[in-house]
Image: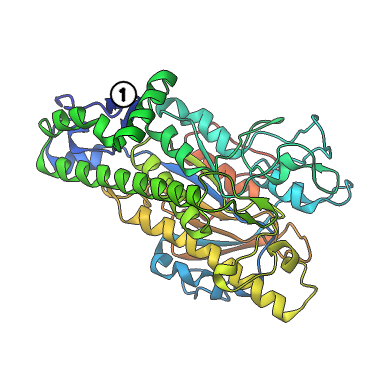
Amino acid sequence: MNQPPILHRRTFLRGLGAAMALPMLEAMIPARSMAAAAGAAKTPTRMAFLFVPNGAHMPDWTPLANGADYDLPYILQPLQPYKNELLVITGLTQDKGRSNNDGGGDHARSAGSWLTCSQPLKSEGAQIRVGISADQMAAHAVGQQTRFGSLELGLEPGRQGGKCDTGYSCAYSNNISWRNESTPMTREINPRLVFERLFSNAVPKEVSEGQRRRDIYKKSILDFVLEDAKALRSKVGGNDRQKLDEYLSAVREIEQRVEETEKAVASASPSVANGYEIPEGIPESYEEHARLMVDMMVLAFQSDTTRVCTFMLANEGSNRSYRNIGIGDGHHSLSHHQGDHVKQMKIREINRFHMQQFAYLLGRLSSIPEGDGTLLDHSMIVYGGGLGDGNRHNHDDLPIVMAGRGNGTIETGRHLAYAPETPMANLLVSMLQRMDAPVDSFGDSTGPLRGLEG
């Protein structure tokens, strides 16, 4: 008979205003031979969706060969170190992003339908309606096992009302996660607020007092959980002590980066980028902003604080310029390239830059051991958007890449080319089933997506 574990999986380090979940430690596994215990311990499956707007330059996105014997095209080349952990998926369609007799508004529909597989109601006011999104269906299935059912991240501010695209509310363009048909899960774009959400104890008076003391005495959040951390180190073995130290160092490194960002923003004049004033606490560097958010997503998965995340790398229809890579034109404006080669080459550079942020995420996930594999092995990470070519505004042959083995249920390292009009909803059904959500159909699905298993 197995002896109970030394620590419960839901152990927290606690202090004034702080509650820090921990990564999986050997002390959380029932006592047996370590080999048997590692094999028997069930690691949770994580799900994440990273959204990019305005379509892609598909000729430099789509591999020429199918199956395992394919080369990554130009836009996907930043993923080369993780090629064996990928599925490049082409041919999927999001029919509910199409007009279906509703006229213009492809950008709003592409974001609103991407994870809901439902037709957004054409409305600028309070009568928004689309459908529950796949990430929230997963959160309903597994969210009770974690501190947060889901985590919603973004990089651009965005209104939740008013018109953003041809009669459609901005709520559609600025959200991909929907709790129900009329309630979007608003993204958080401020790194400080994400950090505090992940590591505070949600008791308002304690959180406020803890933040005040940290500011006055130049303390880290780790200083407030130090006593618990010392007590924990005395209970666990050397491997766990090393893992704990590495985890706490990662938390501190992110906290320092957040603090440095806040200092830099506070000392600078108000910045305006892409038509809006950069909110307080937001890094001026898009790349630093993106990577701060990625690192916090990884910590949330590593500590099992949540198993479900969505991340909008930009709002749909975003006209952000990317001067850091030498492109001063707005992204949305460039996407209406009308066959202009120069504009198409700029679009592919923006696509590749976004892909570099995805590669950074995969590198972080693959670097963290967990059980019999890595955090990436136990995840399903989908990257893509709801438009094919931004100039055509087509909703078929979407740019989709999936990474991670889904806890051994997905055979990666392949390009899967599906027949035209294969619903993207089929992919979402397959992912939901791997999250133990009781789903046989979703939106316009015709069943699970065949071939993920190999």
Relative depth, front residue between 345 and 445 = 345
Whether residue 393 is visible here, answered yes or no, is yes
Please state if 263 lies on the left or on the right of 328 as rendered: left
Please state if 239 lies on the left or on the right of 333 as rendered: left
Relative depth, front residue between 99 and 286 = 286
Residue carrying label 1:
16
Kindly indicate the quadrant of the structure image that contains residue 91: bottom right
Height in image: 6 above or below 453? above
For the N terminus, the image quarter is top left
Please state if 225 lies on the left or on the right of 308 as rendered: left
Kindly indicate the quadrant of the structure image that contains residue 121: top right
Relative depth, front residue between 85 and 210 = 210
| Residue 80 x, y percent position in the rendering | 43, 70
Identify the residue shown where x is 18% and y is 28%.
227
| Residue 297 x, y percent position in the rendering | 43, 45
Identify the residue shown where x is 38% and y is 47%.
378
Q: How many marks?
A: 1
Whether residue 411 is visible here, answered yes or no, is no
Identify the residue shown where x is 54% and y is 67%.
353
The residue sitting at the bottom extreme is: 341
| Residue 195 x, y percent position in the rendering | 42, 38
Kindly indicate the quadrant of the structure image that contains residue 58: bottom right
Q: Residues within 10 Å of mark 1 (few under 14, many from 20)?
A: many
Please state if 364 lies on the left or on the right of 186 as rendered: left
Element under label 1?
Answer: loop
Task: Indicate how the structure is coloured in the image.
Answer: rainbow
